Image: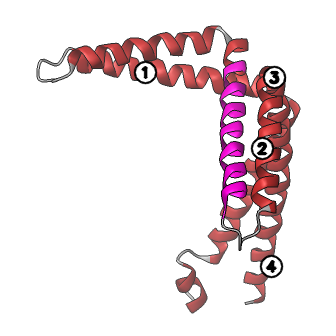
Amino acid sequence: MSDQNIQMGIPTKLAWQLQLLAGAITLVLGVILASHPTTSINVIAVILGIVLIIGAIFHFVRMLDHEEQHRVWVGIAGLVELVVGIVLIRHLGLTRALIGLVIGISWIIQGVVALLAGVLGHPSRSRFWPIAFGLISILAGAIVVAVPEHSVSVLMTIFGIWFVIMGGLEIALGLVVRSESKKA
């Protein structure tokens, strides 16, 4: 094994192959997200619902343990997880809207914080970027909150395009690493 391979921590041959694999997976996910955004969101919602239902089962099992100090609260948490999990799976339109609302509200909060930081910030520092970011974030959040279900589909399409770009770059980097390893 050469010194270069030892310094990298993994063999160069494996590094470029892993890079290509990561790029291919990212690219495929991007194509799926960009071409089927609503279906992708539905799959995410169902998976999240299943995870919550499984979590509820574990809470119910913990609730039956006589050594558990907070059996009532564990049972309530399990019941809430079960109900939310079923709602996420059964009402996909509502789930998409909730995802959009969470994203939109978080962008509004982030925008208000950035805007306040820009307005109330230190006079010696530039206030333009925090104020601009805050206004853009508030506007984007308001749009997403106004039409959450459609906004989430648009966001999934944008994420899909971004994943396609990132996957292509990862594949290109893997090929560069492969080419460099052949030269060495």
Q: Nearer the viewer, residue 155 or 2?
A: 155
The residue at 75%/28% (across/down) is 40
Display colour scheme: secondary structure
In which quadrant is the C terminus drawn? bottom right
* Label 4–label 3 contact, CB within 8 A: no
Q: Is residue 131 visible?
A: yes
Residue type, mark 4 in image: Ser
**Which residue is drawn at the image coordinates 76% and 25% (left, top)?**
145
- The residue carrying pointer 4 sits among few (fewer than 14), some (14 to 19) or many (20 or more) residues within 10 Å by Cα, namely few
Label 4 sits on a secondary structure element that is helix
How far across and down, in percent of the image, does residue 161 sit?
86, 45
Amino acid type, callout 2: Ser
> Residue 114 got which mark?
none
| Label at residue 146 | 3
Residue situated in front as seen by the camera: 144 or 63: 144
Q: Which residue is mark 4?
A: 179
The span from disc 2 to disc 4 (Cα, nearest Å) is: 42 Å
Region in magenta? 97-121
Tell me the distance, in whole angstroms, between the alpha carbons under discs 1 and 4. Answer: 46 Å
Mark 3 vs mark 1: in front: 3
- Image quadrant holding the N terminus, namely bottom right
- For label 2, count other residues whose C-alpha is less than 10 Å away and answer few (under 14), some (14-19) or many (20+): many
Question: Does 145 sit above or below residue 78?
Answer: below
Nearest-to-viewer mark from 2 and 4: 2
Disc 1 marks a residue whose amino acid type is Ile
Would you say the residues marked 2 and 1 are in contact, meaning their CB atoms lie under 8 Å apart? no
> Dot 2 corresponds to which residue?
137
Decide which of tag 4 and tag 3 comes sooner along the chain: 3
Q: Which disc is residue 54 wearing? A: 1
**Nearest to the observer: residue 162 or residue 80:** 80
